[in-house]
Image (cartoon, rainbow, N blue to C red):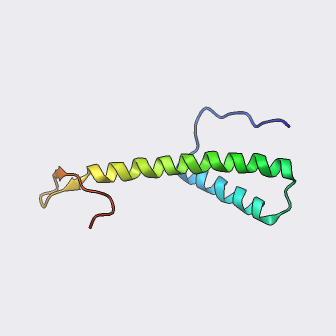
């Protein structure tokens, strides 16, 4: 089975999420042969890891940017802390 050429530029979060949604849709349809299903699943896992990594990086950036009343950064706090 031929593999797709590797693109040196990773997709954006939005592109990766859309591709992952397309893969899930195809797998859920049940119309994909077994070998192709395995390949799609592997690609889906790569995309899931990429999306999770980007979300983790975004959360980390948000944790670093905590502003005081005058708009200057005052420190950090966890992303999910009110």
Total count of labels: 0
Camera-side residue: 10 or 31? 31
Image check: 15 left or right of 35? left
- Which residue is at a point 78% across and 48% down the rendered structure image? 38
Q: Position of residue 25 (x, y in %)?
A: 73, 63
Q: Report the quarter where the C terminus lies.
A: bottom left
- Which residue is at a point 29% across and 53% down the rendered structure image? 63
- Which residue is at a point 55% across and 54% down the rendered structure image? 14
> In the displayed structure, would residue 7 be above or below residue 68?
above
Residue farthest to the left, as pictured: 70
> In the displayed structure, would residue 7 be above or below residue 60?
above
- Which residue is at a point 62% across and 45% down the rendered structure image? 46
Camera-side residue: 7 or 45? 45
Q: Position of residue 73 (x, y in %)?
A: 18, 51
Q: Position of residue 43 (x, y in %)?
A: 69, 46
Image check: 52 left or right of 4? left
Q: Report the quarter where the N terminus lies.
A: top right
């Amino acid at each position: 089975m031929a593999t797709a050429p590797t693109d040196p530029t990773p997709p954006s979060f939005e592109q990766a999420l859309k591709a992952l949604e397309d893969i899930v849709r195809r797998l859920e349809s049940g119309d994909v042969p077994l070998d192709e299903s395995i390949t799609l699943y592997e690609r889906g896992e790569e995309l899931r890891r990429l999306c999770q990594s980007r979300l983790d990086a975004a959360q980390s950036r948000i944790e670093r940017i905590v502003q005081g009343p005058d708009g200057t950064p005052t420190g950090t706090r966890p992303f999910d802390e009110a």
